[in-house]
Image (tube, rainbow, N blue to C red):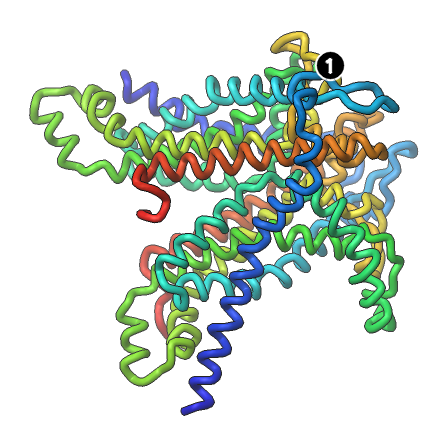
Amino acid sequence: MTWRKLVNMSMFGITALCTLVTVSTLFFILGALIYHGATSLNWAFFTRLPVPVGETGGGMANAIVGTGKLLLLTILMGVPAGFIGGVYLSEFGGAAFSSVVRYTADLLNGAPSIVIGILAYALVVKRMGHFSTFAGGFALSLIVIPITLRSTEQFLRVVPQSLREGALALGASKWKAVVTVVIPAAMRGVLTGTILGVARVAGETAPLLFTAFGNPYWSAGWLHPTSALPMMVYTYGLAPYEDWHRQAWAAGLVLLVMMLIANIGARLILSPRGAQST
Amino acid sequence: MVHGITFVFAATVIAIAVLLVTQLWGQSALSRAKFGWSFFVGRTWDPVAGEFGALPFIYGTVMTSALALLIAVPLGLGSAIFLAEMAPPRISDALTFVIELLAAVPSVIYGLLGAFLLVPLMRTVVQPALIATLGYLPEFKGPNYGVGVLTASVVLAIMILPFVVSISREALMAVPREQREGALAVGATRWESTWQVVVPFARLGIAGSVFLALARALGETMAVTMVIGNDPKISSSLLAPGYSIAAVIANEFTEATSDLHLSALVELALVLCLLTIVINGLARLLILATTRKGTAQP
């Protein structure tokens, strides 16, 4: 009897320790980035261009703007496509076709992002003959479509059936009921899913390597290569210069803070009374 | 009309998947024609001589992923059990949120921490200790550079941990309450009910989480590229530098010197893509099977 209680107690301790190790990783990551990166976050980091090798200082203004442009393209191309597809699955789709789409979307979500990058390279870069901001946005859109589709569908599905029936009973057509009643009712959830999806692709590096390519200067336009924050973390982190390492840490910190704000913000949108109520 | 438009967008997902496989297949034609099946057993990767063999990359990818699972699964399952069965709900919810945040950390950040913090730690503390104690085994013979297969595995383990935890936890929580109550009613302790009743009941879902994590590990690019050492050799030692499929694509794709080189890289991508699709497909089926009705009891 005592032995069994002892086992029970010690397994409680061991599993708690496992959890402690897992959870503390996040605080360790955050702490390390703040320790190594916070001192390099200054006005120049956000407003200046990178300086040539050998000079110290400079910033990552072009990469920050580049990430913004890539995400704008993702929001304009990928998010609407995934959203409308999700509406189909939840509101119009037949069971068999929907489950095929759902399964395919899950498989795409699990496909390595670098492979999606090669697809974007084959479809856009190869045809245009050069790397571009557009190709990067296209690659990120390919990644965000299945994510948005799944989250949209999930949140539309939990809208009570009685709301749809009420709208239809008042004489609304099917699509009018969807647009004016179902989608607004699920707006909070859809928005949350979108923020999380965009936040996830904001940190993607691999698919940008051979689409957006990187650029040490301001990008001349949508059809020209651009830099992005995650790419700067990679290239500056692996470069053999002390001053670049410092900036890589700073860029990593900015990226992580953006990600944390997006995730916590999304959680607050979903449950406005605070995270603890979920 | 509206129906038709939404249908087109839903079908986009299938179009992307089909394009993905057909493009990779088409763009790798040159390499497939030249090397055939010998591509998978070739050990030489020499862009200058036009000689491309995939074995060192396949070895590196599979080895790092397997080691990562070996580290992450016990730790992740332990955490999932704590969160689903042992901890009070409020604490469990808060900790689960932290673990979900962990899953959202960009992989390049794991790479940065790996390269600047883990590599020196492995070189100065962990690997010398391994060589001193287990050095008689070929797996731990050295060399000691800090970067290498073992370091990449540790980084991967940390990265896939949140996936193991959150999906295993969901599988455990999907187990009907009667199962626990039954075990507790016949006098089982909390742990006995968890280990002998709840975990076996959720075993398919847990297996699903492991496969899902495996697919993640196989395809992980940036973090591995930054710590594996990028040397296309197969070494018996886990401490030696290696290379992975995703890493070689990241490093060489934009600098490919010839059409054949590019084609060989795309063939590697095809292998990686099919591998992750198969493993993911299996994982999804397992997870669907448990979260719907639980594992059938023998």
Q: For the point 42% across and 76% down, which residue is it? A: B191
Residue A246 location (% of width, % of height): 75, 34
Q: Amino acid at mark 1?
A: Tyr
Residue B210 location (% of width, % of height): 54, 57
Residue indicated by mark 1: A217
Left/right placement of residue B118 relative to residue A152 reads right
Output the chain of dot 1: A
- The picture quadrant where one finds residue B139 is bottom right
Residue A253 location (% of width, % of height): 63, 36
Left/right placement of residue B248 relative to residue A150 reads right
Viewer-proximal residue among B68 and A233: A233
**The residue positioned farthest toward the left in the image shown:** A170
Image mark count? 1
Helix, strand or loop at disc 1? loop
- The picture quadrant where one finds residue A258 is top right
* Residue B141 appears in view: yes
Residue B145 location (% of width, % of height): 86, 53
Q: For the point 46% across and 89% down, which residue is it? A: A3
Is disc 1 surrounded by few (<14), some (14 to 19) or many (20+) residues within 10 Å? some
Q: Quadrant of the N terminus of chain A?
A: bottom left
* Residue B266 appears in view: no
Viewer-proximal residue among A137 and B8: A137
Viewer-proximal residue among B257 and B143: B143
Q: For the point 82% across and 24% down, which residue is it? A: A56
